[in-house]
Image: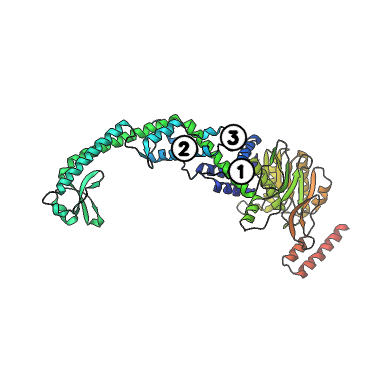
Amino acid sequence: MQADLKPLEFNAVRKFLERLTHTPYGADAARALEPAPNLEVARQMQDAVSAARAFFEAQQRLSLGALPDVRAALRQAATVGASLSGQALFNLQQVMQGCTQLHAELQGFPGVYPGELDELLPPKAVVERLARTLVGAGSLRDDANAALAELFAERKTLRDEAERVVERRMAGEDVRALFEEGKQVAWHHERAVLTLRAADAERVKGVRRDSRMGGRDVLVEPMEAVAVNNRLEALNGRIGAEQQRLFRDITATVREHLDALERMISALTWVDLALAAGRLSQSMNAHAPRLSEAPEIELNEAYHPLLLVQFADGSGPQPVPLSLRLDVKDRLLLITGPNTGGKTVALKTLGLLAVMAHCGLHIPAEGDCTVGSYARLIVDVGDHQSLYHQLSTFAGHVEVLKRVLAEADGESLVLLDELGTGTDPEEGAALAMAVLDELGARGVQGVVNTHLAPLKEYAADRPGLRNASMRFDAETLRPTYELCIGVPGASLGLIIAEQNGLPSELVAGARAHLERIAAQDAT
């Protein structure tokens, strides 16, 4: 389904999901979430979310911690001759360990992934290769291969020799008094050196390598140690070259198993997103709607998820559930009444829940719900006035109507807020009627909000079009935000204006003008 996501504030749902993911892969998937290309894919995700919800309801423990992002490293490894760094290989090792642990924890809930859960398992050859060669955060083991083992053994011998040379120089009668008993040989970039006070440095013939303690101490390489240090430095160069060769060789092993590693990452991405959606379902006490092949929607006491979250964290009132049905018989719902009753919230609730269902997410509702197949969801909500584009509010609505008339058909769900507003009320009502005629003729389904009174009578005798309104409390004359289908909205603008602080004398004058206008219309 193609859908207008921005006016429905779907990005807020994405952010909720993103915060519940564990990995950068799931987080990216949450940020990019959109309706599935078809209901079969949506059902796969829906089943995965249901399995994830069951996993958490069973109080299973998920040990998946923060994992690094290895996607760039895998792309690099695809190039022949590439050499991944020790850190990149260590990151891959961490991800493979996380996937292995996740695979074990999900054994009783294989439905979290629509494919084979074993795709979460990393290739054994890569696991074993990294286990044999890596130590710590990305360093190679000294015995990672036979060549390195031999080089490091030679290195130890040379280091011992270099230390003995420097120790003999420290024990010389001319400088022995300069060193405390038990003074150790210092090292500077793998060269054995002495540590001397700056004032005494000239007493040892050698090369100044560095200073310490703000210049108080000086590192001096005695001339006696230069030859062995040079040999040691050359050996370290050979070690470095062998390590780089080995990194390329390990990267080649990774490259040989890229397909399996990419399947592992894809499975991890899906599972992480499904687990986050399961958590979201649990927090909202949501459930899976029935996904129907027919273009239809039935909501039974369903909630706007963002209002539900605001209520849960104490920043908003308890939301009122919404119940309605659209199908091939009752295609269009016309909600009339004043602007403060919640018409826009009802429209956004319907649109947002339809999008969530097509993404495979659960929706918060007290009763069973059905969301059918729609090719597109077109939404017109908000003020389209734009100084930059020199558009009035009415012109902005007209631009949206042009797109609606160009795209909408019997597989479309259309949500139009304040149809016909922004111009002369009579012309606006006439335009709205013509638009509704056209939508009805095309078999389009949707909800249309308006406060234009002539549309109430128009909707009363049109097949496929039903009146509806938002209920107001008869005693307090305040909105209850309940949708009443079959009942057109009452004109309560003057009452609401008075209750919101306009002077009673002014409102009384408005009533007198209203009576005069009504009398003129009657004649």
**Residue hosting label 3:** 114
Q: CA distance from mark 2 to mark 1?
A: 24 Å
Residue 320: image quadrant is: bottom right
Q: Residues within 10 Å of mark 2 (few under 14, many from 20)?
A: many
Above or below 374: residue 196: below
Confirm or deny contact between disc 3 and disc 2 (CB under 8 A).
Answer: no
Q: Secondary structure at mark 3?
A: loop
Disc 2 or 1, which lies upstream in sequence?
1
In the image, residue 100 above or below residue 430: above
**On the rendered structure, is 305 left or right of 259?**
right
Residue bearing mark 2: 96
As shown in the figure, which amino acid type bears the numbered disc 2?
Met
| Side of 496 relative to 232 (left or right) | right
* Quadrant of the rendering where the C terminus is positioned: bottom right
3 or 1: tag closer to the N-terminus: 1
Q: Residues within 10 Å of mark 1 (few under 14, many from 20)?
A: many
